[in-house]
């Protein structure tokens, strides 16, 4: 491969990586909207609507999704931050952290009611979640 | 056209091999990525989505950077270090940048020499090191691409495992980044050392990378 062509491909690789990051920030609004609708539904007793916004595996992890999702104690709150990396996202809400995955038909909640493990927050341990896949 | 192909057959052959294997990597990579996605409760991606993903970009870039580093170091180190008996090495006493006359630069440039070889000042200096500079820049660019794409792929995995994402600074000091980097570097250095040493004692008839079959093992800087 000619040097010029290689430089172009290298720049394309860097650009791909940067665009991936850039697109991630554009996805933030969509992620936040799904998280807010999910928490509102779960917090206000609309279990059916909340379960529709759960990832299929997360919904299946609950015996009776519509009843159980409203009894977990999830509440809507102010969104404090959103991280989107590819097809995975994390949303910080007052008193809660949610993890979402992007499916072909949109973002769905993979885990909710999550908290970092208090004494192991920097040792690569996953969050502890009330609802999980 | 036929002559053009024949005159550039070596470059064309490797370009075609590159494209074929990159295509193969993209297909195999899509399948492997989707196996992992499904196992983690996620959804499958299309080939087009995969080849524009950070996961594919980091896998490609981490191999590129090590190849360019290999050539960059080989080009530079063989200026100063020799290996007796190696067709890839200069002879003893020829170490270093060599004289302008030997290198045909400045007033010693031949009629067919490139213009910048005959020039003085910075143009002569830049052209005298242009191969090393190009390989070095390609290495740094590929390595940067690896770090940026690797960060995106790593953080995607972190979130999939319900763990905290990290910053770029955090990533380039992480075990994941250095594991990807060093596992490629070690293989390149081993391959170069093997080539340098094996080419002393073994031959490939007709290859310019080898000495002539009948050349003595001790003969340095010859090719067959």
Image: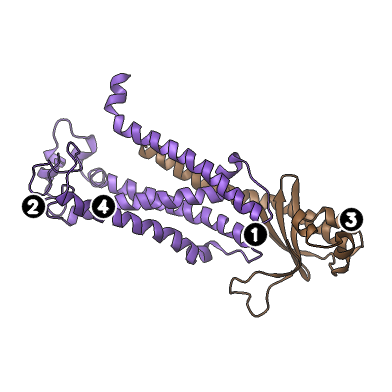
Chain colours: A brown, B purple
Mark with earlier residue (4, 2): 4
Quadrant including the C terminus of chain B? top left
Based on the displayed image, in which of its 4 quarters is residue A34 positioned?
bottom right
Q: CA distance from mark 4 to mark 2?
A: 21 Å
At a point 25% along the width and 56% down the height, the residue shown is: B193
Q: Position of residue A26 (x, y in %)?
A: 68, 49
Q: Are marks 3 and 1 on the same chain?
A: no
Residue shown at 76% from the left, 59% from the top: A58
Q: Nearer the viewer, mark 1 or mark 4?
A: 1
Q: Quadrant of the N terminus of chain B?
A: top left
- What chain does badge 1 belong to? B
* Residue carrying label 2: B218
Are labels 1 and 4 on one chain? yes
Residue B153 x, y percent position in the rendering: 56, 55
On the rendered structure, is B168 left or right of B70?
A: right
Q: Is residue B187 visible?
A: yes
How many angstroms separate mark 3 from mark 2 (CA)?
A: 82 Å
Element type at mark 2: loop
Q: Which mark is residue B74?
A: 4
Does label 4 lie on the same chain as label 3? no
Which residue sits at x=46%, y=48%?
Answer: B60
Both labels 1 and 2 in a single chain = yes
Q: Which residue is mark 3?
A: A48
Q: CA distance from mark 3 to mark 1?
A: 25 Å
């Amino acid at each position: 491969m000619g040097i010029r062509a290689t430089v172009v491909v290298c720049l394309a690789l860097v650009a791909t990586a940067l665009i991936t990051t850039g697109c991630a920030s554009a996805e933030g609004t969509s992620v936040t909207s799904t998280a807010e609708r999910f928490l509102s539904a779960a917090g206000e007793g609309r279990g059916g609507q909340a379960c529709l916004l759960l990832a299929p595996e997360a919904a299946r992890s609950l015996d009776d999704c519509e009843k159980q999702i409203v009894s977990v104690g999830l509440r809507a709150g102010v969104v404090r931050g959103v991280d989107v990396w590819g097809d995975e996202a994390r949303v910080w809400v007052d008193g809660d952290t949610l993890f979402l995955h992007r499916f072909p038909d949109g973002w769905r909640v993979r885990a909710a009611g999550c908290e970092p493990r208090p004494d192991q927050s920097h040792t690569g341990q996953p969050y502890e979640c009330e609802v999980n896949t | 056209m036929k002559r053009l192909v024949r005159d550039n057959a070596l470059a064309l052959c490797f370009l075609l091999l590159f494209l074929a294997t990159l295509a193969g990597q993209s297909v195999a990579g899509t399948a492997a990525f989707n196996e992992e996605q499904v196992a983690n409760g996620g959804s499958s991606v299309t080939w087009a989505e995969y080849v524009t993903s950070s996961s594919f970009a980091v896998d490609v870039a981490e191999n590129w950077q090590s190849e360019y580093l290999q050539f960059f170091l080989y080009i530079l180190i063989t200026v100063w270090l020799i290996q007796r008996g190696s067709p890839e090495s200069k002879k003893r006493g020829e170490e270093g940048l060599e004289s302008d006359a030997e290198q045909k630069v400045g007033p010693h440039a031949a009629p067919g020499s490139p213009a910048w070889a005959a020039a003085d000042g910075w143009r002569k200096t830049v052209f005298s090191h242009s191969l090393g500079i190009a390989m070095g820049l390609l290495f740094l660019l590929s390595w940067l691409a690896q770090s940026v794409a690797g960060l995106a792929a790593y953080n995607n995995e972190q979130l999939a495992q319900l763990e905290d994402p990290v910053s770029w600074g955090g990533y380039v000091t992480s075990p994941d980044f250095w594991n990807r980097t060093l596992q490629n570097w070690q293989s390149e250095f081993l391959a170069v050392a093997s080539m340098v040493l094996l080419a002393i004692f073994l031959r490939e008839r007709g290859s310019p990378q080898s000495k002539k079959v009948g050349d003595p093992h001790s003969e340095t800087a010859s090719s067959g």
